[in-house]
Image: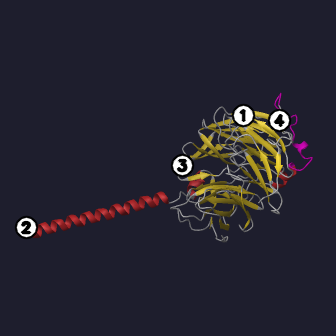
Amino acid sequence: MTTRRLIGARSLRTLAFFLTAVAWMVANRSVMESQAAPRLITRDQARHLGLERAWFGQVRLDRTRNQVERAVLTGNRLTVLTSAAVVHEFDANTGETLWIAPIGNPNFPSLGPAASHQHVALLNGSTLYVLDRTDGRPIIVRKVGGAPGAAPALGKQHVFVPLLNGQLEGYPLGEQTISPWYFQAYGRAMVPPLATPRSIVWATDAGHVYVADSQELGVRFRLETSSDIAAQPAYRAPYIYTATMNGELFAVHELTGERRWKFAAGFLVTRAPAAVGARIFITSDEPALHCVDAANGQALWEAPHVTQFAAASEKRVYGVDELGALVVLDAASGSLLERMPTEGTEALVNDQTDRLYLVSNDGVVQCLHEIGAKQPLQHVPPAAEAKAAEPGAEATTEPTATEPVEEGADTAAPADADDDLFGGLSEDDDEGEPADEGGFGVDDDNPFD
């Protein structure tokens, strides 16, 4: 009798231990799944902010091994690069997947993407890839001349690659037998260059900003600041806006090098400024979001605790605060209107339209807009941008009586065409299948609600 009781007690203990182990596994699996599940803003949450969801989609990636590296918006296309060197192209207005292209070696680090209306460019290791933006097909694959320092930039005729040794290389987008362009700068080029319709702009950690003609070989001028530069310049024709690590923001004419004004944020600046209409938005490490008048560099307002600009409409400005929450600000005063925590998502900086794009590390992309705003608000219509960049058009965009130039404004140093340090050199060149996959529409069933 005693033996049977002992056996029965052991069996009960074994069963209890087994059931406890199963319960622990189920609970931990639920926790892990909830942590891995992306944070999708529901329709009710969006309405609370005065927004509605236009669409959402999923970037093709293995969530257990890879993540989103970077997303860029150009025109009506949203281009996403993953850590596995996969480029996923979305229609920015509908969320439709246009193509997916695996590029290079998934184990190599990738820099990019950069996009124009015709091409997408990225670096995989030390190899440059240029894709046809129509279908994602690689049209240029070539080694670069050194260790890349940052993502490339796309001009009309060349793709530009910054190198750690300070050199900027320009490879032709057409016939590959044409000699590349080479520009030498002082310092290391570790910030993505900026390509405008007429210029290529790049900065170095020595605090120098170089502006060259993107269609004819030659450097126009250099701007020497007193601090390192860690943020890509911004552009609104015909001015280039450059922020430095010591908190200064410069507005410089892209053709003449004339400095229009300088603004002091007072704290470290590591994010690129955003030029939206007649305003420049810049975030400092205070943290604070500064709204600056693009005409004269005067501060219009300051929003504390905001670390990133995301988008702007006629009456609202959207950003991210120091805790990662999405914030809605009044465009006139910068006062806080609404705030909503967002877990596991990052906002894309959109200085082109009023659309708000949120991208999670595991590849969920959401597009939000204000209720009833079915068509995107274009801050600078493409036709106006092209007209402002035409030869002879710069006179119409110069400061007028209502747009005063800073008293005592100076001009950046012109480059010496005969000096190899600042000029350009041209030397003889010694030298996966895209998939079609649909996205989630706004009216589709929401698997995350």
Viewer-closest of 237 and 131: 131
Left or right, 264 with respect to 307, comes to: right
- The residue type indicated by label 3 comes to Pro
Estimate the spatial distance between the alpha carbons at disc 1 and disc 2, rounded to whole Å.
88 Å
**Vertical placement of 421 versus 383: above or below?**
above
Q: Which mark is residue 413?
A: 4
Q: Which-is-in-front pick, marks 4 and 3? A: 4
Badge 4 element: strand
In which quadrant will I find the N terminus? bottom left
Estimate the spatial distance between the alpha carbons at disc 4 and disc 1, rounded to whole Å.
27 Å
Rendering coords of residue 57 (x, y %): 61, 63
Which tag, 2 or 4, sits closer to the chain's start? 2
Which tag, 2 or 3, sits closer to the chain's start? 2
Is residue 341 visible to us here? Answer: yes
Disc 1 packing (10 Å; few <14; some 14–19; many ≥20): some
The verdict on residue 398 being magenta is: yes
- The residue type indicated by label 4 comes to Ala
Q: Which mark is residue 299?
A: 1
Q: Are marks 4 and 1 in contact (CB under 8 Å)?
A: no
Disc 4 packing (10 Å; few <14; some 14–19; many ≥20): some
Q: Tell me the residue that label 3 is attached to.
A: 341
The secondary structure making up most of the magenta span is loop
Estimate the spatial distance between the alpha carbons at disc 1 and disc 3, rounded to whole Å.
28 Å
The verdict on residue 212 being magenta is: no
- The residue type indicated by label 1 comes to Ala
Viewer-closest of 257 and 347: 257
Badge 2 element: helix
Q: Which residues are magenta?
A: 388-409
Badge 1 element: strand
Give the quarter of the image for residue 290: top right
